[in-house]
Amino acid sequence: MKPLLLINGRPLFQHALDHAVTVWGADQCLAVVSPDNARHVLSVVSPGVCEHWILQPRPDGVIDALRRALPLVRYDRVLILCADNTFSSLEHTDVLLRSTYAFFGVREIAMPDALRFTRYVSYDDGGVHLLEAGTHEMGQGCWIGPLVLHTVQAREAIGTWPATVVDFIHAATHGGRDLQPIPMRCADLGVPQELASVSPDR
């Protein structure tokens, strides 16, 4: 139930939607929700804020969510946000308009010794590297912060049936060659085990 966690009095899900519109200028919002979260998300977020609400038959993760949402995107760029990320841009908000590249949000300080960490960008040799995720990510692989891709390339990549999110990102960015980092302050919020075991109705 991470999308419903309150940050500054508002659920994470609402922060992601607001960020997409106010910071990135999104003209179309699509939301993919799992059956575990749908009723609770819609109880706190107005259905009218998104053009489409897409219900996963099962909680099958990000790859399944992308496969369901990408065909509905009407623009040549797609911004992908996860509701368990928090972020703030350190650059101009018009960076999307000024660049021909795909973008990837990156936290300022890597924490490889953390219990739970996601793939992030390294600048060591001037390149972009997606590092291995920790064991607590269950081998899924993920990213942190905003992910901006060309819609056509994203659709082609998801059509290859990638095994993980990072496989998808590589396929959508010519092996990472089109991927450029955006300096961001990011956090991927995990849920302690004792919270994860509590019913959302309690």
Image (cartoon, grey):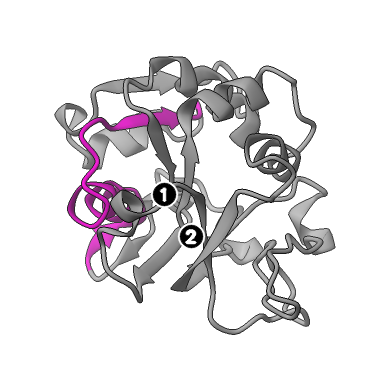
134 or 35, which lies in front? 134
60 or 157, which lies in front? 157
| SS type, badge 2 | loop
Inspect the image, locate mark 2, and give the three-letter code of the amino acid beneath it: Gly
Residue 55 to residue 184: above or below: above
Q: Estimate the x, y position of residue 132 in percent, counting from the top left.
A: 81, 61
The number of discs equals 2
Q: Are marks 1 and 2 in contact (CB under 8 Å)?
A: no
Task: Kindly identify the residue that appears in the image at 62 percent across and 25 percent down.
Answer: 64
State yes or no: residue 114 in magenta.
no
**Range of magenta residues:** 9-35
Q: From mark 1 to mark 2, how far is it between C-alphas?
A: 15 Å
200 on left or right of 129: left
Which residue is identified by label 2?
Answer: 145
Residue 21 to residue 68: above or below: below
Q: Estimate the x, y position of residue 38 in percent, counting from the top left.
A: 40, 29
Q: Which of marks 1 and 2 is nearer the N terminus?
A: 1
Task: Kindly identify the residue that appears in the image at 44 percent across and 72 percent down.
Answer: 184
Q: Mark 1 or mark 2, which is nearer to you?
A: 2
Residue 116 to residue 196: above or below: below
Task: Kindly identify the residue that appears in the image at 24 percent across and 23 percent down.
Answer: 51
Q: Estimate the x, y position of residue 126 in percent, counting from the top left.
A: 68, 74
Inspect the image, locate mark 1, and give the three-letter code of the amino acid beneath it: Pro
| SS type, badge 1 | helix
Label 2: few (<14), some (14–19) or many (≥20) C-alpha neighbours in 10 Å: many
Which residue is identified by label 1?
Answer: 3
Residue 79 to residue 99: above or below: above
Quarter of the rendering containing residue 158: top right
